Amino acid sequence: MAAIAHAFRAGGPNRDLVLSYAEDVKLLRSPRRSPWRWVFVVACAALFWLLPTYFVGDPGLRILAMCGIFAIGAIGLNLLTGFTGQVSLGHAFFVGAGAYTAAYFGGQRGWSMPAYLLLAALIGFVVGGVIGPFALRLRGNYLVIVTLGLVFLGQHLWSNWDSVTGGGAGISLGAAPMSIGPLDFKEGIELGGEAYSFEQSFFWLVWGLVALGALLAKNLVRSRPGRAMQAIRDRDLSAEVIGVSLARYKVGAFAWSSAYAAVAGALYGLLQQYVSPVEFGLFLAITYLAMIIIGGLGTIFGSVLGALFVWGGRSVIEQNSGQAIFDPLITTGSGEAGIFTIGEFNAVLFGLAIVLFLLFEPRGLAAFWLRIKSWFLTWPFSY
Amino acid sequence: MSPVPLLAAITADDLLQTGFSGVALGCKYALIALGFSIIFKATGVINFAQGAFVLIGAYFTYSFTQTWELNFYLSVVLAMAAGAVLGVAIEALVLRRLVNEAPVTVIMVTIGILFILDNVVTAIWGPDNRNLGDPWGVSTRELLGVTVADRDMWTMASTGLVLAAFYVFFRFSTLGLAMRAAAVDPEAAMAQGIPARRVYRVSWAIAGMVAALAGTTLAAGSGQLSPATGALALVAFPAMILGGLDSPLGAVVGGIIIGLVQQYTALLAPEYFDWVGESFERVSPYLVMIIILLIRPFGLYGTQEVRRV
């Protein structure tokens, strides 16, 4: 079908014709050959600049920054679960490890931001590499429950290692420096004589890191390690038979995924300015898994979409709970009619979203895009 | 009784008492874990929503005794029936569409159901602690030198009864045989004319029934029933996985091990190894689970997965 559609286009060889392997895995071909991808990149860049400066106020930017933080963690989890097929409920543990690294080395010791962010990534990488071998011994459901145990053990550790984590009460990141060179994100950066607020600056920092992380992950999955990971996901036995080292790539996937999680945790701490053990519980782990499922397992783009959808949706409902359409459903105070509190309502919607997506669109939000794309590619013979 | 010299601060009485309460607690976990294992055995699904079934079962019992003012034991039976209906409904509405899906899909769907049910329960019955209205209350009796709560006796008796019923059902009934066959090899079972749908439905119904019973035993006592009761079901995960996912006997043995581990850590940790931190008993089950799984990856009684190239 596609071939017939292409015959209608005048001039030049088929757009999808590739002559070499390098060309096949290229991210961006020339604008003439993949125009829409260029439109997408330019639109993202424009939004990156315009959202904080023109369209969204500080409270909205906080939410978007949080979405970006979740997106970084979700990309990491997608590397592990979506690409390597190792389901982990333990992501919250690694997020916590990163958050406490930032709190201790940034907040208590006063390290500079690049230093403690890198250290968080490194600690995440190492801890993930230590946990990774569990995946060699345990498979499927057993691995899920063990990683679930990891979350509880982690919470116990955060609650009791008082000298580093501040114990059950938590620890402040208020003293953590947040500057890279001349750019001080905490006070708000200055660019070209213009001073920006903390929220604007932090939005740029987070989404810049999202872009970096997405590019890194994309490069990982489109090269040799990525193909090995996907072979393990599709059938680990066959992968092993054709010579893919399970030990190397399973442990590697855990390490990379937790490095992403730890960076997300560190940024989370910086945005909240305070972290405590209860935040890194099972709910966070489930939220991350839900994000990659709703966004699309095995796609980098989907991780970002899922984070925006889940966290953005939750925040939008929280902020609009007083609106009239929610009146019969949500009660905002004692005595007022309504079935659910806001938290309950959001949790029910969250559960519903997970169930409905898995039943009706298991490939997630990313699949909507793929469908639109194939509709246009096969035009005028779309069906 | 004289103190045991080895453990200076803790007497033999304490150890015995703790052992007993450990077994009692373990039986509660075992009841929850039995519900998990029956579904897993028949359908290969780890049902995270089992915690919500437990919670709803307990609230059903509460409603029947307190709102409808029925006899307590009748209420428990009714709650079990209602639990069975709930299990069948969930299977018919959702899980039926997900046969043979990847574990992550099924797990996440049951987690989604858990979120929905948990919050609907809170919305219906409210967040307060309530009295279940059981006749056992907080009464205790002396037995072999240890103090035994009446409700613990009932818990242990019902766990034993359920395990016996499972054994009889799977060993002697036609449907039980069909379920065992379907668990071993679904395709071969279907080729023999075993109705897979009915097997799935029955296993979810049984899980719902056992969950209601488990919820009732968990919530028995004074003011023990609250939406947080469902969270206790999470501790049944180590129990279930420790025994082996697909073994009802393993669920009971695992439950009792976890119960004992928890109670003995609570007793001994503050005395002898307080460096592990406060309330270590909350996480010690997970630690034990991880250690045992590393030695035996399919639990104590689980079926080893055979992989052929």
Image (tube, rainbow, N blue to C red):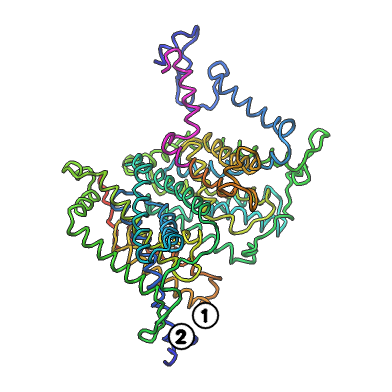
Q: Quadrant of the C terminus of chain B?
A: top left
Magenta part, dominant SS: helix
Q: Residues within 10 Å of mark 1 (few under 14, many from 20)?
A: few
Which SS class for mark 1? helix
Q: Any mark on residue B7, and which?
A: 2
Along the line of sight, which residue is nearer the eye, A334 or B154? A334
Which quarter of the figure has residue B106? top left
Residue sitting nearer the eye, B85 or B251: B85
The chain to which mark 1 is attached is B
A226 lies left or right of B23: right
Chain to which mark 2 belongs: B
Q: Kindly identify which numbered label has been placed on residue B271.
A: 1
Q: Amino acid at mark 1?
A: Glu
* Picture quadrant of residue A43: top right
Asked whether the residues under the numbered discs 2 and 1 touch, taking CB atoms below 8 Å apart as contact, a structural biologist would say: yes
**Is residue B28 or residue B241 the one in the foreground?**
B28
Task: Decide whether residue B142 is among the magenta residues.
Answer: no
Left or right of A343? Residue A137 is: left
Magenta range is: A354-383
Residue located farthest toward the front when viewing the structure as drawn: B69
Picture coordinates of residue B108 (x, y %)?
A: 44, 46
Q: How many marks?
A: 2
Q: Is residue A270 visible?
A: yes
x then y, percent, for residue B306: 26, 51
Where does the N terminus of chain B fall, quadrant-wise? bottom left
Question: What's the residue at 73%, 37% (across, down)?
Answer: A57
Instruction: Report x, y in % for residue B122.
Output: 52, 54
Q: Amino acid at mark 2?
A: Leu
Q: CA distance from mark 2 to mark 1?
A: 9 Å
> Is residue A71 toward the left or the right of residue B246 in the image?
right
